[in-house]
Image (cartoon, helix red, strand yellow):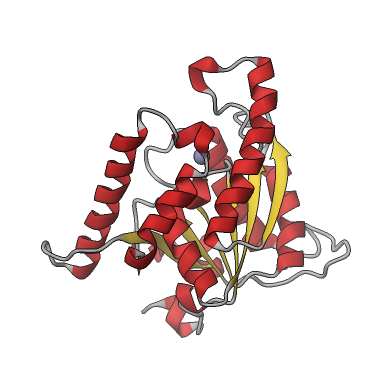
Amino acid sequence: MNIRQVLGLPEVLEAKRVVCVQPHPDDNEVGAGGTIKTLTSKGCEVAYITVTDGRAGAGAGGTAVVADELVTTRRAERMHAGAILGVGVQEELGFPDGGDYTIEDVTARLVALFRRLKPEIVMTVDPWMPYEAHPDHIKTGLAVARALQFCNNAILFPPGDQPPCEIPQVAFYGTSYPNTWVEVTPYWETKMSSLLAHKSQFDNEEWPLLSMYFGYAAQELWRQYRKDPEATGYAEAFKVLATRQLHFFPTALYD
Ligand SMILES: [Zn+2]
């Protein structure tokens, strides 16, 4: 039994309003850039919510001054990348990259935004990816899952200017447990362009190898999906769940 079919939930590519929540300014492009471009090309309204400011993205070259500049740089890069993919609205929560904030802090902000944006599907990182160690990714994924559960709960989250609402499903990208594949072959180069819009992160000597890896991984996902080792094309993969599978639903791992 596929509970999403029983509930009559739309396929990912049939959604008309999608919100993509990313921990850092480039995660949506890495995990779902080709799918986002496919959606906007079909007339879907896609909005971004970016949880942190990306200030820690300078690695070993980081100083306090560099971090402050990076926040501005990465905001511009994020807007540019989103424009390449046809993303309309971009919201930012401004939590410090890698910093001391809680899942509850993020959840409350997301509930308010979800009630305003009313997406049919929310896309985000998979906090249950077994070896995920980055706190921003874990906190963001868990905050999205909680916000989806409680978006329709006026006791836990009293309505402000927007009434409670039901958001029926979630698609985790970059997952180890995919159950949904989207062909992104027509937009592969567009996805790569959107990644390179994040110059501070990708326009460096690692890019030739990294872009090759992205391409190889996406081709492997396509071959897995088609169950054909000779198939040529690119795919992105998601764990798509109905929101009600996010609570007391032991079979969700296998759906
Ligand atoms: Zn990230």
Question: 89 or 73: nearer the eye?
Answer: 73
In the visual, does 204 lie left or right of 99? left
**In front here: 22 or 178?**
22
Using the rendered image of the protein, determine whether residue 144 is visible from the camera's viewpoint: yes
Q: Residue 134: percent from the left, percent from the top? A: 49, 33
- In the displayed structure, 98 sits above or below 245; it is above
Q: Residue farthest to the right?
A: 161
| Looking at the image, residue 189 lies above or below residue 39 | above
- Decide if residue 205 is on the left or right side of residue 57: left
Q: Quadrant of residue 207?
A: top left
Residue 30 place in picture, x, y as percent: 44, 48
Q: Which residue is drawn at the image coordinates 62% and 37% (left, top)? A: 74
**Quadrant of the image containing the N terminus:** bottom left
Residue 8: x, y in percent?
50, 85
Q: Residue at x 50, y 46 (%)?
A: 27
Q: On the picture, is 59 further left or further right than 45?
A: left
- Residue 248 in sight: no
